Image: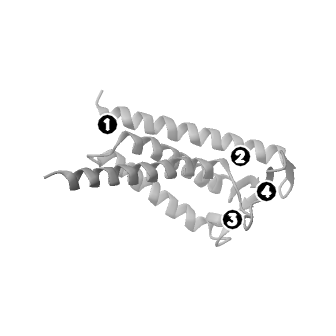
Amino acid sequence: MSEKLKNLGLFSLISISVLLISQLIGQWVNANIALNTTVEINNLIHFTHIRNFGGIFGMFQGMGWLFGFISIGLLVAVVVYLWFGNSVSRYEFACFGFIVGGGTSNILDRLIYGSVIDFIDIQHIPYWNYVFNTADVMVHVGIWPMLFVSFYLDSKNSRSTLKSP
């Protein structure tokens, strides 16, 4: 089996796992926490069941369909990049797996419920009043390591290129 197919398998496994986990947790929240109510897990973490009919950080309420279309376009672009890219690193397949799985889960929420189920409510952070979901966390699990590794490798490669005669 080629390295590309192994990496696509890893990407698919992560994407599908994240999608399933995010959807199952969202269904649990929907079934067990009444809309617009809060369950205090501890002093820091509350589960507050709300619906996001907009986009990131609840902006542009009522425009969820637009974010759905944009998300679908971005997810297709990622898959095309991974499929046709010649120098895609293994870590990119893994990181994009988290991003695509989380993004797909939010799109599926919009299709099933007409909104995204948000519930993770972190308390006691100044100027922070956002509620998010498992899929959002998974997108960040993919984005931040990819950015860190990309910048680290780019700066490391730049330094070695500068040192080479």
Q: Quadrant of residue 93?
A: top left
Q: How many marks?
A: 4
For disc 4, the marked residue is 123
Which residue type carries mark 1?
Lys
Which residue type carries mark 2?
Gly
For disc 3, the marked residue is 53
Q: Quadrant of residue 59?
A: bottom right
**Would you say 53 lies left or right of 90 here?**
right
In this view, the residue farthest toward the left is: 165
Disc 3 crowd rating (10 Å Cα; few below 14, some 14-19, many 20+) is many
Query: Could you say whether the residue bearing mark 3 is in a helix, strand or loop?
Result: loop
Which residue type carries mark 3?
Phe
CA–CA distance between discs 2 and 1? 33 Å
Q: In this rendering, is residue 1 above or below 15?
A: above
Mark 4 or mark 2: which is in front?
4
CA–CA distance between discs 3 and 2? 15 Å
- Residue lying at 76% horizontally and 41% vertically, measured from the top left: 28
Disc 2 crowd rating (10 Å Cα; few below 14, some 14-19, many 20+) is many
Image coords of residue 10 (percent x, y)? 44, 35
Query: Could you say whether the residue bearing mark 2 is in a helix, strand or loop?
Result: helix
Q: Residue 4 bears which disc, if any?
A: 1
Q: Are marks 3 and 2 in contact (CB under 8 Å)?
A: no
Image coords of residue 111 (percent x, y)? 62, 55
- Residue lying at 68% horizontally and 51% vertically, measured from the top left: 133
Q: In this rendering, is residue 161 above or below 11?
A: below
Query: Could you say whether the residue bearing mark 4 is in a helix, strand or loop?
Result: loop
CA–CA distance between discs 1 and 3? 38 Å
For disc 2, the marked residue is 26
3 or 2: tag closer to the N-terminus: 2
4 or 2: tag closer to the N-terminus: 2
- Residue lying at 45% horizontally and 41% vertically, measured from the top left: 94
Which residue type carries mark 4?
Gln
